Image: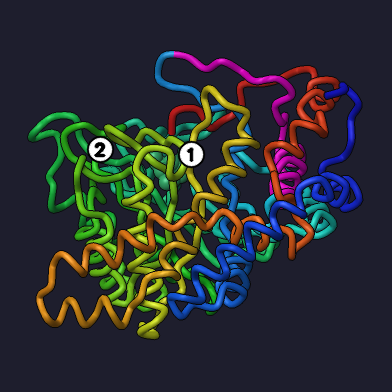
Amino acid sequence: MTDKYADPRDRAFIADDNARLSKDLDADYAALGTILQRRGLDIDAITNTVASFGVAIPSWGVGTGGTRFARFPGRGEPRHVFDKLEDCAVIHSLTGATPTVSLHLPWDYTEDMPALRQRATALGLGFDAVNSNTFQDRPGQPLSYKFGSLTHTDAAVRAQAIEHNIDCIRIGQLLGSKALTVWIGDGANFPGQQHLGRAFERYLESTAQIYAALPADWRMLIEHKMFEPAFYATVIQDWGSSLMAAQTLGPKAFCLVDLGHHAPNVNIEMIVSRLVHARRLGGFHFNDSKYGDDDLDTGCIDPYRLFLIFNELVDAQWRKAPDFQPAHMLDQSHNVTDPIESLMTSAIELQRAYAQALLVDRQALSDYQQGNDALMAAQTLKRAFTTDVQPILARARLQKGAAIDPVGAYRRSNYRNECANKRPSAQNFGGGIV
Ligand code: PSV
Ligand code: MN
Protein backbone atom coordinates (compact mmCIF):
# COMPACT_ATOMS: atom_id res chain seq x y z
CA MET A 1 0.00 0.00 0.00
CA THR A 2 1.28 3.46 -0.88
CA ASP A 3 0.58 6.68 0.99
CA LYS A 4 -0.91 8.28 -2.10
CA TYR A 5 -4.35 9.78 -1.60
CA ALA A 6 -7.26 8.88 -3.84
CA ASP A 7 -10.75 10.27 -3.28
CA PRO A 8 -12.81 7.27 -2.14
CA ARG A 9 -15.94 8.98 -3.49
CA ASP A 10 -14.55 8.93 -6.99
CA ARG A 11 -16.43 6.39 -9.14
CA ALA A 12 -13.32 5.62 -11.19
CA PHE A 13 -11.32 4.84 -8.03
CA ILE A 14 -14.04 2.46 -6.81
CA ALA A 15 -14.39 0.81 -10.22
CA ASP A 16 -10.66 0.26 -10.28
CA ASP A 17 -10.72 -1.32 -6.87
CA ASN A 18 -13.66 -3.55 -7.84
CA ALA A 19 -11.91 -4.77 -10.98
CA ARG A 20 -9.57 -6.95 -8.90
CA LEU A 21 -12.43 -8.62 -7.07
CA SER A 22 -15.30 -8.94 -9.52
CA LYS A 23 -14.28 -12.30 -11.04
CA ASP A 24 -14.31 -14.09 -7.69
CA LEU A 25 -17.56 -12.38 -6.79
CA ASP A 26 -19.21 -13.58 -10.02
CA ALA A 27 -18.24 -17.17 -9.18
CA ASP A 28 -19.45 -16.93 -5.56
CA TYR A 29 -22.69 -15.27 -6.63
CA ALA A 30 -23.41 -17.95 -9.23
CA ALA A 31 -22.75 -20.71 -6.67
CA LEU A 32 -25.07 -19.13 -4.10
CA GLY A 33 -27.67 -18.54 -6.81
CA THR A 34 -27.74 -22.28 -7.51
CA ILE A 35 -28.18 -23.13 -3.82
CA LEU A 36 -31.01 -20.63 -3.42
CA GLN A 37 -32.70 -21.77 -6.61
CA ARG A 38 -32.98 -25.25 -5.07
CA ARG A 39 -34.87 -23.59 -2.22
CA GLY A 40 -37.17 -21.85 -4.69
CA LEU A 41 -35.52 -18.44 -4.22
CA ASP A 42 -34.50 -15.99 -6.94
CA ILE A 43 -31.14 -14.51 -5.94
CA ASP A 44 -31.46 -11.47 -8.21
CA ALA A 45 -34.77 -10.48 -6.66
CA ILE A 46 -33.22 -10.71 -3.19
CA THR A 47 -30.18 -8.71 -4.29
CA ASN A 48 -32.41 -5.95 -5.68
CA THR A 49 -34.41 -5.79 -2.45
CA VAL A 50 -31.24 -5.61 -0.37
CA ALA A 51 -29.87 -2.89 -2.66
CA SER A 52 -32.94 -0.77 -1.91
CA PHE A 53 -32.21 -0.83 1.84
CA GLY A 54 -30.86 2.38 3.35
CA VAL A 55 -29.87 3.44 6.85
CA ALA A 56 -29.17 6.96 8.13
CA ILE A 57 -25.75 7.83 9.53
CA PRO A 58 -25.86 9.66 12.86
CA SER A 59 -23.82 12.83 12.39
CA TRP A 60 -22.35 12.31 15.87
CA GLY A 61 -21.12 8.85 14.88
CA VAL A 62 -18.39 10.04 12.52
CA GLY A 63 -16.46 11.63 15.37
CA THR A 64 -14.60 9.47 17.87
CA GLY A 65 -16.79 8.68 20.87
CA GLY A 66 -15.80 8.34 24.47
CA THR A 67 -16.91 6.95 27.79
CA ARG A 68 -17.55 8.58 31.14
CA PHE A 69 -13.85 8.09 31.83
CA ALA A 70 -12.06 9.40 28.78
CA ARG A 71 -12.18 10.24 25.14
CA PHE A 72 -9.20 9.48 22.94
CA PRO A 73 -9.52 11.71 19.87
CA GLY A 74 -8.88 10.09 16.51
CA ARG A 75 -6.77 11.43 13.65
CA GLY A 76 -8.41 13.82 11.24
CA GLU A 77 -11.72 13.95 13.04
CA PRO A 78 -14.45 16.16 11.56
CA ARG A 79 -14.34 19.66 13.05
CA HIS A 80 -17.90 20.70 12.23
CA VAL A 81 -21.04 19.56 10.50
CA PHE A 82 -19.67 20.23 7.01
CA ASP A 83 -16.72 17.89 7.67
CA LYS A 84 -19.16 15.33 9.05
CA LEU A 85 -21.09 15.44 5.78
CA GLU A 86 -17.91 14.74 3.81
CA ASP A 87 -17.29 11.62 5.92
CA CYS A 88 -20.91 10.51 5.51
CA ALA A 89 -20.49 10.84 1.75
CA VAL A 90 -17.45 8.53 1.87
CA ILE A 91 -19.50 5.95 3.75
CA HIS A 92 -22.33 6.15 1.24
CA SER A 93 -20.06 6.10 -1.82
CA LEU A 94 -18.34 2.93 -0.65
CA THR A 95 -21.39 1.06 0.69
CA GLY A 96 -24.30 2.48 -1.31
CA ALA A 97 -26.32 1.84 1.85
CA THR A 98 -26.38 5.17 3.72
CA PRO A 99 -28.17 7.81 1.63
CA THR A 100 -29.19 10.00 4.58
CA VAL A 101 -27.77 11.71 7.66
CA SER A 102 -29.50 12.25 10.98
CA LEU A 103 -28.50 15.54 12.60
CA HIS A 104 -28.35 16.36 16.30
CA LEU A 105 -29.13 19.92 17.40
CA PRO A 106 -27.54 22.08 18.65
CA TRP A 107 -24.39 19.95 18.10
CA ASP A 108 -24.78 20.36 14.34
CA TYR A 109 -26.09 23.88 14.33
CA THR A 110 -24.78 26.21 11.64
CA GLU A 111 -26.00 29.69 10.68
CA ASP A 112 -26.34 28.66 7.07
CA MET A 113 -28.64 25.64 6.93
CA PRO A 114 -29.50 26.16 3.23
CA ALA A 115 -25.76 25.92 2.43
CA LEU A 116 -25.60 22.68 4.41
CA ARG A 117 -28.50 21.28 2.44
CA GLN A 118 -26.86 22.35 -0.81
CA ARG A 119 -23.62 20.62 0.11
CA ALA A 120 -25.51 17.48 1.08
CA THR A 121 -27.36 17.45 -2.24
CA ALA A 122 -24.08 17.88 -4.11
CA LEU A 123 -22.72 14.88 -2.19
CA GLY A 124 -25.82 12.80 -2.98
CA LEU A 125 -27.07 12.86 0.61
CA GLY A 126 -30.42 13.71 2.20
CA PHE A 127 -31.50 14.21 5.82
CA ASP A 128 -33.42 11.78 8.00
CA ALA A 129 -34.88 12.64 11.42
CA VAL A 130 -33.48 15.61 13.35
CA ASN A 131 -32.69 14.87 17.00
CA SER A 132 -33.37 17.46 19.67
CA ASN A 133 -31.08 17.77 22.68
CA THR A 134 -32.41 18.83 26.06
CA PHE A 135 -30.20 16.41 27.96
CA GLN A 136 -27.37 18.89 28.42
CA ASP A 137 -26.98 22.64 28.84
CA ARG A 138 -25.36 24.70 26.16
CA PRO A 139 -23.25 27.80 26.84
CA GLY A 140 -25.37 30.86 27.53
CA GLN A 141 -28.61 28.92 27.94
CA PRO A 142 -30.88 30.81 30.37
CA LEU A 143 -32.26 27.83 32.34
CA SER A 144 -30.61 24.55 33.27
CA TYR A 145 -31.77 21.01 32.46
CA LYS A 146 -30.02 19.59 35.50
CA PHE A 147 -33.36 18.50 36.96
CA GLY A 148 -35.13 17.75 33.72
CA SER A 149 -36.38 19.40 30.57
CA LEU A 150 -39.79 18.57 29.09
CA THR A 151 -40.87 17.17 32.47
CA HIS A 152 -39.19 19.75 34.73
CA THR A 153 -41.24 20.96 37.71
CA ASP A 154 -40.69 24.58 36.58
CA ALA A 155 -42.93 25.59 33.67
CA ALA A 156 -40.30 28.05 32.40
CA VAL A 157 -37.76 25.24 31.90
CA ARG A 158 -40.38 23.16 30.14
CA ALA A 159 -41.19 26.09 27.87
CA GLN A 160 -37.51 26.46 26.96
CA ALA A 161 -37.26 22.76 26.09
CA ILE A 162 -40.47 22.90 24.05
CA GLU A 163 -39.16 25.91 22.14
CA HIS A 164 -35.92 24.06 21.34
CA ASN A 165 -37.87 21.13 19.89
CA ILE A 166 -39.97 23.50 17.78
CA ASP A 167 -36.75 25.15 16.56
CA CYS A 168 -35.50 21.71 15.57
CA ILE A 169 -38.60 21.22 13.44
CA ARG A 170 -38.03 24.59 11.73
CA ILE A 171 -34.40 23.73 11.03
CA GLY A 172 -35.37 20.26 9.85
CA GLN A 173 -37.79 21.83 7.39
CA LEU A 174 -34.93 23.84 5.89
CA LEU A 175 -33.06 20.58 5.36
CA GLY A 176 -35.90 18.47 3.98
CA SER A 177 -36.22 16.25 7.06
CA LYS A 178 -39.59 14.69 7.79
CA ALA A 179 -39.26 13.62 11.41
CA LEU A 180 -38.24 14.82 14.85
CA THR A 181 -36.73 12.33 17.28
CA VAL A 182 -37.25 13.21 20.92
CA TRP A 183 -35.14 11.55 23.56
CA ILE A 184 -34.97 13.10 27.02
CA GLY A 185 -32.72 12.18 29.91
CA ASP A 186 -35.33 13.29 32.45
CA GLY A 187 -35.82 11.10 35.49
CA ALA A 188 -34.71 10.59 39.07
CA ASN A 189 -31.77 9.12 40.95
CA PHE A 190 -33.63 8.62 44.23
CA PRO A 191 -36.93 7.04 45.19
CA GLY A 192 -39.19 9.90 46.16
CA GLN A 193 -37.20 12.50 44.19
CA GLN A 194 -39.88 12.76 41.56
CA HIS A 195 -43.61 12.11 41.47
CA LEU A 196 -43.62 9.35 38.87
CA GLY A 197 -47.13 10.00 37.64
CA ARG A 198 -46.93 13.79 37.51
CA ALA A 199 -43.62 13.72 35.63
CA PHE A 200 -45.29 11.62 32.92
CA GLU A 201 -48.27 14.00 32.82
CA ARG A 202 -45.90 16.93 32.36
CA TYR A 203 -44.21 15.01 29.53
CA LEU A 204 -47.55 14.57 27.78
CA GLU A 205 -48.42 18.26 28.17
CA SER A 206 -45.06 19.40 26.82
CA THR A 207 -44.92 16.98 23.91
CA ALA A 208 -48.49 17.91 22.94
CA GLN A 209 -47.21 21.42 22.24
CA ILE A 210 -44.35 20.07 20.13
CA TYR A 211 -46.75 17.74 18.35
CA ALA A 212 -49.01 20.70 17.53
CA ALA A 213 -46.08 22.35 15.71
CA LEU A 214 -45.41 19.32 13.45
CA PRO A 215 -45.99 19.99 9.75
CA ALA A 216 -48.66 17.79 8.16
CA ASP A 217 -46.16 15.38 6.57
CA TRP A 218 -43.90 15.06 9.62
CA ARG A 219 -43.68 12.35 12.26
CA MET A 220 -42.57 12.56 15.85
CA LEU A 221 -40.41 9.63 16.99
CA ILE A 222 -40.42 9.03 20.72
CA GLU A 223 -37.30 7.23 21.94
CA HIS A 224 -37.41 5.36 25.22
CA LYS A 225 -34.45 4.35 27.38
CA MET A 226 -34.48 2.37 30.57
CA PHE A 227 -31.78 4.20 32.49
CA GLU A 228 -28.89 6.68 32.23
CA PRO A 229 -28.45 9.49 33.02
CA ALA A 230 -31.27 8.86 35.53
CA PHE A 231 -30.49 5.68 37.46
CA TYR A 232 -33.58 5.14 39.57
CA ALA A 233 -36.43 6.09 37.23
CA THR A 234 -36.53 7.48 33.72
CA VAL A 235 -39.71 9.21 32.56
CA ILE A 236 -39.91 7.46 29.17
CA GLN A 237 -38.19 4.31 30.30
CA ASP A 238 -39.77 1.62 28.16
CA TRP A 239 -41.93 0.92 25.14
CA GLY A 240 -45.04 0.94 27.34
CA SER A 241 -44.56 4.59 28.26
CA SER A 242 -43.51 5.47 24.74
CA LEU A 243 -46.56 3.73 23.25
CA MET A 244 -48.91 5.43 25.72
CA ALA A 245 -47.39 8.78 24.81
CA ALA A 246 -47.65 8.12 21.06
CA GLN A 247 -51.27 7.01 21.38
CA THR A 248 -52.14 10.02 23.50
CA LEU A 249 -50.45 12.48 21.16
CA GLY A 250 -52.00 11.36 17.88
CA PRO A 251 -51.44 9.59 14.57
CA LYS A 252 -48.17 11.36 13.72
CA ALA A 253 -46.45 10.11 16.89
CA PHE A 254 -44.52 6.83 16.78
CA CYS A 255 -42.15 4.81 18.95
CA LEU A 256 -38.46 4.59 18.19
CA VAL A 257 -36.57 1.50 19.34
CA ASP A 258 -32.90 2.00 20.17
CA LEU A 259 -31.53 -1.51 20.52
CA GLY A 260 -29.37 -0.57 23.50
CA HIS A 261 -32.14 0.92 25.62
CA HIS A 262 -33.55 -2.17 27.28
CA ALA A 263 -32.90 -4.35 30.28
CA PRO A 264 -30.42 -7.15 29.58
CA ASN A 265 -32.04 -10.17 27.91
CA VAL A 266 -35.22 -8.33 26.99
CA ASN A 267 -36.83 -9.82 23.89
CA ILE A 268 -36.56 -6.84 21.53
CA GLU A 269 -38.08 -8.64 18.53
CA MET A 270 -41.18 -9.16 20.65
CA ILE A 271 -41.39 -5.41 21.31
CA VAL A 272 -41.01 -4.80 17.58
CA SER A 273 -43.87 -7.19 16.88
CA ARG A 274 -46.13 -5.48 19.42
CA LEU A 275 -45.37 -2.02 18.02
CA VAL A 276 -46.11 -3.24 14.49
CA HIS A 277 -49.43 -4.54 15.81
CA ALA A 278 -50.19 -1.18 17.43
CA ARG A 279 -49.23 0.58 14.14
CA ARG A 280 -46.73 2.69 16.05
CA LEU A 281 -43.31 1.39 15.07
CA GLY A 282 -41.60 4.59 13.98
CA GLY A 283 -38.03 3.48 13.55
CA PHE A 284 -34.78 2.25 15.01
CA HIS A 285 -31.49 3.36 16.39
CA PHE A 286 -29.35 0.35 15.56
CA ASN A 287 -26.31 -0.64 17.58
CA ASP A 288 -25.24 -3.64 19.65
CA SER A 289 -24.49 -4.23 23.30
CA LYS A 290 -23.53 -6.79 25.88
CA TYR A 291 -24.47 -5.07 29.13
CA GLY A 292 -26.45 -1.88 28.62
CA ASP A 293 -26.46 1.07 26.28
CA ASP A 294 -22.98 0.12 25.07
CA ASP A 295 -23.38 1.73 21.63
CA LEU A 296 -21.20 -0.95 20.04
CA ASP A 297 -21.17 -1.65 16.32
CA THR A 298 -24.36 -3.18 14.96
CA GLY A 299 -24.23 -6.96 14.81
CA CYS A 300 -20.83 -7.25 16.52
CA ILE A 301 -22.12 -9.01 19.67
CA ASP A 302 -25.38 -10.72 18.85
CA PRO A 303 -26.07 -11.00 15.12
CA TYR A 304 -28.80 -13.58 15.72
CA ARG A 305 -30.84 -11.07 17.70
CA LEU A 306 -30.45 -8.58 14.86
CA PHE A 307 -31.63 -11.24 12.42
CA LEU A 308 -34.68 -11.97 14.60
CA ILE A 309 -35.58 -8.28 14.57
CA PHE A 310 -35.32 -8.22 10.78
CA ASN A 311 -37.35 -11.38 10.66
CA GLU A 312 -40.19 -9.43 12.29
CA LEU A 313 -39.70 -6.53 9.86
CA VAL A 314 -39.79 -8.78 6.79
CA ASP A 315 -42.81 -10.57 8.21
CA ALA A 316 -44.58 -7.21 8.61
CA GLN A 317 -43.68 -6.29 5.02
CA TRP A 318 -44.87 -9.70 3.82
CA ARG A 319 -48.20 -9.30 5.62
CA LYS A 320 -48.48 -5.68 4.44
CA ALA A 321 -48.88 -4.44 8.00
CA PRO A 322 -50.64 -1.05 8.04
CA ASP A 323 -48.72 2.16 8.87
CA PHE A 324 -45.47 0.22 8.61
CA GLN A 325 -42.68 2.55 7.50
CA PRO A 326 -39.91 2.36 10.07
CA ALA A 327 -36.97 4.76 9.78
CA HIS A 328 -33.58 3.04 9.92
CA MET A 329 -30.86 4.92 11.72
CA LEU A 330 -27.61 3.95 13.38
CA ASP A 331 -26.72 5.25 16.84
CA GLN A 332 -23.26 4.14 17.87
CA SER A 333 -20.18 5.45 19.61
CA HIS A 334 -16.81 4.45 18.18
CA ASN A 335 -14.09 4.57 20.79
CA VAL A 336 -11.43 2.24 19.43
CA THR A 337 -12.02 2.08 15.67
CA ASP A 338 -12.01 4.48 12.77
CA PRO A 339 -15.66 5.65 12.86
CA ILE A 340 -15.95 5.51 9.07
CA GLU A 341 -14.94 1.84 9.07
CA SER A 342 -17.32 1.03 11.92
CA LEU A 343 -20.24 2.78 10.25
CA MET A 344 -19.63 1.07 6.90
CA THR A 345 -19.39 -2.30 8.59
CA SER A 346 -22.54 -1.64 10.60
CA ALA A 347 -24.60 -0.62 7.57
CA ILE A 348 -23.50 -3.86 5.90
CA GLU A 349 -24.45 -5.89 8.99
CA LEU A 350 -27.96 -4.47 8.72
CA GLN A 351 -28.13 -5.49 5.07
CA ARG A 352 -26.86 -8.93 6.03
CA ALA A 353 -29.62 -9.39 8.61
CA TYR A 354 -32.15 -8.13 6.07
CA ALA A 355 -30.91 -10.53 3.36
CA GLN A 356 -30.98 -13.46 5.78
CA ALA A 357 -34.52 -12.58 6.84
CA LEU A 358 -35.56 -12.46 3.19
CA LEU A 359 -34.37 -16.07 2.84
CA VAL A 360 -36.79 -17.38 5.48
CA ASP A 361 -39.31 -19.78 3.95
CA ARG A 362 -42.34 -17.98 5.38
CA GLN A 363 -44.93 -20.44 4.19
CA ALA A 364 -43.04 -23.34 5.74
CA LEU A 365 -42.52 -21.38 8.95
CA SER A 366 -46.20 -20.58 9.16
CA ASP A 367 -47.11 -24.25 8.60
CA TYR A 368 -44.69 -25.41 11.31
CA GLN A 369 -46.09 -22.81 13.69
CA GLN A 370 -49.63 -23.88 12.93
CA GLY A 371 -48.70 -27.53 13.47
CA ASN A 372 -46.75 -26.80 16.67
CA ASP A 373 -43.56 -28.25 15.20
CA ALA A 374 -41.20 -26.23 17.38
CA LEU A 375 -38.02 -27.88 16.17
CA MET A 376 -38.66 -27.40 12.47
CA ALA A 377 -39.93 -23.86 12.99
CA ALA A 378 -36.68 -22.97 14.75
CA GLN A 379 -34.65 -24.76 12.06
CA THR A 380 -36.41 -22.76 9.35
CA LEU A 381 -35.09 -19.57 10.90
CA LYS A 382 -31.64 -21.07 11.50
CA ARG A 383 -31.33 -22.22 7.91
CA ALA A 384 -31.82 -18.66 6.69
CA PHE A 385 -29.54 -17.20 9.36
CA THR A 386 -26.67 -19.59 8.65
CA THR A 387 -26.66 -18.96 4.90
CA ASP A 388 -23.61 -16.96 3.86
CA VAL A 389 -25.18 -14.03 2.01
CA GLN A 390 -21.91 -12.17 1.46
CA PRO A 391 -22.10 -12.48 -2.36
CA ILE A 392 -25.58 -10.92 -2.32
CA LEU A 393 -24.35 -7.95 -0.29
CA ALA A 394 -21.30 -7.43 -2.47
CA ARG A 395 -23.33 -7.70 -5.68
CA ALA A 396 -25.89 -5.22 -4.33
CA ARG A 397 -23.05 -2.76 -3.77
CA LEU A 398 -21.47 -3.41 -7.14
CA GLN A 399 -24.81 -2.77 -8.87
CA LYS A 400 -24.95 0.65 -7.26
CA GLY A 401 -21.40 1.62 -8.16
CA ALA A 402 -20.20 1.10 -4.59
CA ALA A 403 -17.28 -1.02 -3.45
CA ILE A 404 -17.13 -4.81 -3.31
CA ASP A 405 -14.73 -4.42 -0.37
CA PRO A 406 -15.59 -1.07 1.30
CA VAL A 407 -13.09 -1.21 4.17
CA GLY A 408 -10.27 -2.39 1.87
CA ALA A 409 -10.99 0.34 -0.66
CA TYR A 410 -11.24 2.95 2.11
CA ARG A 411 -7.86 1.97 3.50
CA ARG A 412 -6.28 1.96 0.06
CA SER A 413 -7.61 5.50 -0.55
CA ASN A 414 -5.69 6.90 2.44
CA TYR A 415 -8.69 9.14 3.21
CA ARG A 416 -7.95 9.25 6.94
CA ASN A 417 -4.38 10.42 6.31
CA GLU A 418 -5.66 13.11 4.03
CA CYS A 419 -8.11 14.21 6.76
CA ALA A 420 -5.32 14.28 9.34
CA ASN A 421 -3.46 16.68 7.06
CA LYS A 422 -6.46 18.81 6.27
CA ARG A 423 -8.09 18.84 9.72
CA PRO A 424 -5.23 19.37 12.12
CA SER A 425 -7.10 20.68 15.16
CA ALA A 426 -9.40 17.92 16.38
CA GLN A 427 -11.82 19.41 18.86
CA ASN A 428 -13.84 17.73 21.55
CA PHE A 429 -17.24 18.40 19.99
CA GLY A 430 -20.48 16.87 21.29
CA GLY A 431 -21.13 13.17 20.98
CA GLY A 432 -19.19 11.47 23.74
CA ILE A 433 -20.84 8.90 25.91
CA VAL A 434 -24.44 9.40 24.84
C1 PSV B 1 -29.41 8.36 24.17
O1 PSV B 1 -28.63 7.38 24.77
C2 PSV B 1 -29.35 8.24 22.65
O2 PSV B 1 -29.59 6.93 22.26
C3 PSV B 1 -30.31 9.20 21.98
O3 PSV B 1 -30.70 8.71 20.73
C4 PSV B 1 -29.46 10.40 21.80
O4 PSV B 1 -29.97 11.31 20.87
C5 PSV B 1 -28.18 9.76 21.35
O5 PSV B 1 -28.07 8.60 22.18
C6 PSV B 1 -27.03 10.68 21.46
O6 PSV B 1 -25.81 10.00 21.34
MN1 MN C 1 -30.53 6.49 20.37
Q: Decide if residue 106 is in sight here.
A: no
| Marker count (numbered) | 2
| Above or below, 32 relative to 413 | below
Amino acid at pointer 1: Gln
* Mark 2 residue crowding within 10 angstroms, few (<14) / some (14–19) / many (20+): many
Q: Position of residue 297 (x, y in %)?
A: 47, 38
Q: Position of residue 226 (x, y in %)?
A: 24, 43
The reply, left or right, for residue 237 in relation to residue 310 is left
Helix, strand or loop at mark 2:
loop
Q: Amino acid at mark 2?
A: Phe
Q: Which element is circle 1 on?
A: loop
Identified at 59% across, 49% down, the residue is 57
Task: Please give the label number shown on residue 227.
Answer: 2
352 magenta-colored:
no
Q: Could you say which is closer to the camera, residue 55 or residue 20?
A: 20
Q: Is residue 15 left or right of residue 281?
A: right
Residue at figure coordinates x 61%, y 61% from the top left? 170
Residue 162: horizontal and vertical position, in percent?
43, 54
Where, quadrant-wise, is the N terminus in this rendering? top right
Question: Alpha-carbon distance for marks 1 and 2?
Answer: 17 Å
**Residue, x 49% and y 71% (percent of image)?**
36
Dot 1 beta carbon under 8 Å from ligand 1: no
Residue at the spot of label 1:
332
Left or right: residue 425 compared with residue 326: right
Closer-to-camera residue (104/186): 104
Q: Is residue 37 visible?
A: yes
The way the protein has been coloured in the rendering is: rainbow
Span highlighted in magenta in the image: 70-94
Q: Nearer the viewer, mark 1 or mark 2?
A: 1
Mark 1, other Cα within 10 Å: few <14 / some 14–19 / many ≥20:
many
Q: Is 188 rendered above or below residue 2? A: below
Q: Quadrant of the C terminus?
A: top left
